[in-house]
């Protein structure tokens, strides 16, 4: 898969759960949440080996074409060909991103909206389920 747009609205108080399987030779994939195609409030980018990052999960936001400061997760709970689960809770003020190994990262809502309508998944990954509750 190269790019998949998930047509849903994600707002304050909701939880987004994405389950999938990275390709056997995946270098990285990304989950992006934002108000449109150009701005990303949350970029979750597991990198097996991409842009000089080896087994790191990178978090960031992009507004008006400018990336913010990067946050690197401490854990890398992803394996080629093995199912993963990412759970993202949106409090309005921040996103709490949890992984199936129990690790999590808190990322600020830098754009400041209370609802986002653009969710995409890009890269060598097969999404097996997607839910917002």
Image (cartoon, rainbow, N blue to C red):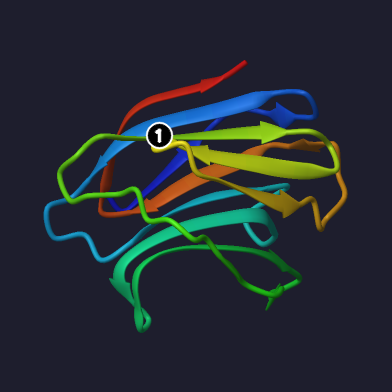
Q: Residue furthest top?
A: 133
Residue 1 x, y percent position in the rendering: 26, 48
Q: Residue furthest left?
A: 24
In the image, is 92 to the left or to the right of 56?
Answer: right
Q: Residue furthest bottom?
A: 52
Residue 28 x, y percent position in the rendering: 32, 62
Question: What residue sits right under mark 1 in the picture?
Answer: 100
In the image, is 41 to the left or to the right of 76?
Answer: right
The local secondary structure at tag 1 comes to: loop
Pointer 1: residues within 10 angstroms few (<14), some, or many (20+)? some
In the image, is 61 to the left or to the right of 101?
Answer: right
Quarter of the figure that contains the C terminus: top right
Residue 63 x, y percent position in the rendering: 75, 67
Query: Which of the 4 image quarters holds residue 48?
Result: bottom left
Query: Which of the 4 image quarters holds residue 84?
Result: top left
In the image, is 108 to the left or to the right of 48?
Answer: right
Q: Nearer the viewer, residue 23 or 49?
A: 49
Residue at 58 percent across and 42 percent down: it is 97
Query: Which of the 4 image quarters holds residue 95?
Result: top right
* 116 lies above or below 63: above
Residue at 71 percent across and 73 percent down: it is 68
* 113 lies above or below 67: above
Count of numbered badges drawn on the protein: 1
* 96 lies above or below 47: above
Q: Nearer the viewer, residue 60 or 3?
A: 60
Residue at 27 percent across and 47 percent down: it is 125
Residue 13 x, y percent position in the rendering: 77, 24
Residue at 76 percent across and 71 percent down: it is 64
């Amino acid at each position: 898969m190269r790019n998949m747009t998930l047509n849903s609205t994600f707002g304050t108080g909701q939880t987004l759960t994405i389950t999938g399987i990275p390709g056997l030779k995946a270098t990285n994939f990304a989950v992006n949440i934002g108000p449109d195609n150009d701005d990303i409030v949350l970029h979750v980018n597991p990198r097996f080996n991409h842009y000089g990052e080896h087994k790191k999960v990178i978090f960031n936001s992009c507004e008006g074409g400018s990336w913010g400061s990067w946050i690197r997760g401490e854990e890398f709970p992803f394996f080629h060909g093995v199912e993963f689960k990412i759970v993202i809770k949106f409090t309005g003020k921040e996103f709490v991103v949890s992984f199936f190994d129990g690790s999590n990262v808190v990322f600020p809502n830098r754009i400041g909206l209370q609802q986002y309508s653009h969710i995409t998944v890009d890269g060598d990954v097969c999404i097996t389920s997607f839910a917002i509750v």
